């Protein structure tokens, strides 16, 4: 397929207009139009719907855009592999993740990885699970480490394991000696929770729907780690996976207890990459390190 035509197609798809693409490319609009027309004839399908609002991708256009993104990233990856032979990496490894793994796990692993590969640089983007997934889909991130409650066909899942929500409390809490807890027992104490867009909130909501008892949290927070001091200083309880908190429980004066309600178990931690993309060796090595670390942490998780 013609490289020039794909270059012009990519620009039009990003800008949403031929004139915007022409400005970026510093060429005439007619030149962009000719390439798009030729490309549509080549693939045998319309790639854009033309309207006064601009150029909107058709279903065929979406498929081609995904291909072009993969091709561009793989070209960069090939050059990065060559550069790595001389210990020169120009583009960072871009990791998107949710707060649960951003507070400790992923930054710690990045530091460990750079001990072995000092030429590597990272870009860490912390967001919601849906945004992290979308960053992988569009190529803005190389890998996403997120919590998910559903299957997703837009990404390739390289690793997945159960990440149930545990009841996290202070070591001196009245429930601290119990091995397992029901949500009903937990709800006799103040609940603190991450905000409504998180997987933890969704698990709590589903479990409450099944028990028929909703207890409004006394504190919502969009930064999970900020809840820890509140819990340590009170009889409040928060919910978190062992992957998120396991390495910091003792030093934080907290402990975690499994919950009996199956709805609180309906979550996975996933490592996601762009479907069909071939990743550079260094990114594959970093993914392998994350997988090993998660498996090691989960060995100590309370059952």
Image: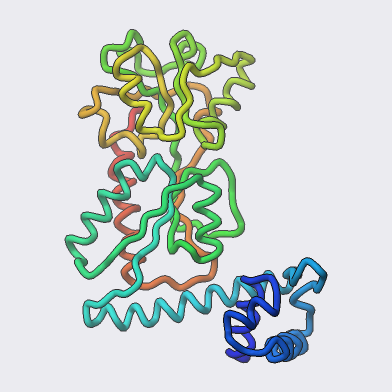
Which of the image's four quarters has the N terminus?
Answer: bottom right
Residue 42 visible in the picture? no
Indicate the position of residue 70 as horizontal and vertical percent values: 53, 74
Indicate the quadrant where residue 206 lies: top right
Position above or below: 208 against 249: above
Query: Who's the residue at 82% across and 70% down the image?
Result: 51
Indicate the position of residue 112 as horizontal and vertical percent values: 21, 55
Query: Who's the residue at 41% across and 35% down the image?
Result: 223
Query: Who's the residue at 41% across and 31% down the image?
Result: 240
Give the side of residue 164 with respect to residue 118, left or right. Answer: right
Indicate the quadrant where residue 203 lies: top right
Indicate the quadrant where residue 52 lies: bottom right
**Viewer-proximal residue among 129 and 275:** 129
Position above or below: 246 against 146: above
Indicate the position of residue 250 as horizontal and vertical percent values: 22, 27
Residue 112 visible in the picture? yes
Which of the image's four quarters has the C terminus?
Answer: top left
Position above or below: 297 against 211: below
Query: Who's the residue at 63% across and 83% down the image?
Result: 8
Q: How many marks?
A: 0
Specify the farthest residue to the right: 51
Indicate the position of residue 77 as horizontal and vertical percent values: 40, 76
């Amino acid at each position: 397929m013609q490289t020039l035509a794909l270059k012009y197609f990519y620009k039009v798809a990003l800008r949403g207009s031929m004139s915007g693409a022409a400005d970026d490319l510093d060429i005439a609009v007619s030149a962009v139009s000719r390439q798009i027309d030729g490309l549509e004839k080549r693939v045998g399908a319309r790639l854009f719907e033309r309207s006064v609002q601009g150029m909107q991708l058709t279903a065929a256009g979406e498929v081609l855009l995904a291909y072009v993104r993969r091709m561009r990233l793989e070209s960069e990856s090939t050059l990065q592999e060559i550069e790595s032979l001389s210990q020169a990496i120009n583009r960072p490894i871009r990791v998107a993740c949710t707060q649960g793994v951003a507070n400790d796990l992923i930054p710690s692993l990045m530091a460990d990885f750079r001990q072995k590969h000092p030429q590597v640089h990272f870009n860490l983007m912390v967001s919601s699970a849906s945004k992290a997934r979308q960053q992988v889909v569009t190529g803005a991130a190389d890998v996403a480490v997120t919590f998910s409650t559903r299957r997703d066909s837009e990404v390739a899942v390289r690793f997945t394991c159960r990440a149930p929500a545990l009841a996290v409390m202070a070591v001196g809490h009245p429930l601290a000696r119990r091995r397992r807890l029901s949500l009903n027992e937990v709800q006799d104490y103040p609940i603190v929770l991450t905000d409504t867009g998180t997987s933890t909130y969704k698990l709590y909501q589903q479990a409450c729907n099944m028990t028929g008892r909703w207890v409004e949290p006394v504190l919502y927070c969009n930064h999970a780690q900020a809840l820890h001091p509140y819990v340590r200083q009170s009889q409040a309880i928060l919910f978190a996976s062992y992957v998120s908190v396991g390495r910091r429980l003792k030093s934080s004066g907290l402990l975690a207890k499994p919950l009996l309600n199956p709805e609180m178990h309906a979550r996975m931690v996933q490592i996601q990459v762009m479907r069909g993309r071939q990743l550079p060796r260094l990114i594959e090595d970093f993914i392998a390190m994350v997988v090993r670390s998660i498996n090691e942490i989960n060995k100590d998780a309370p059952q």
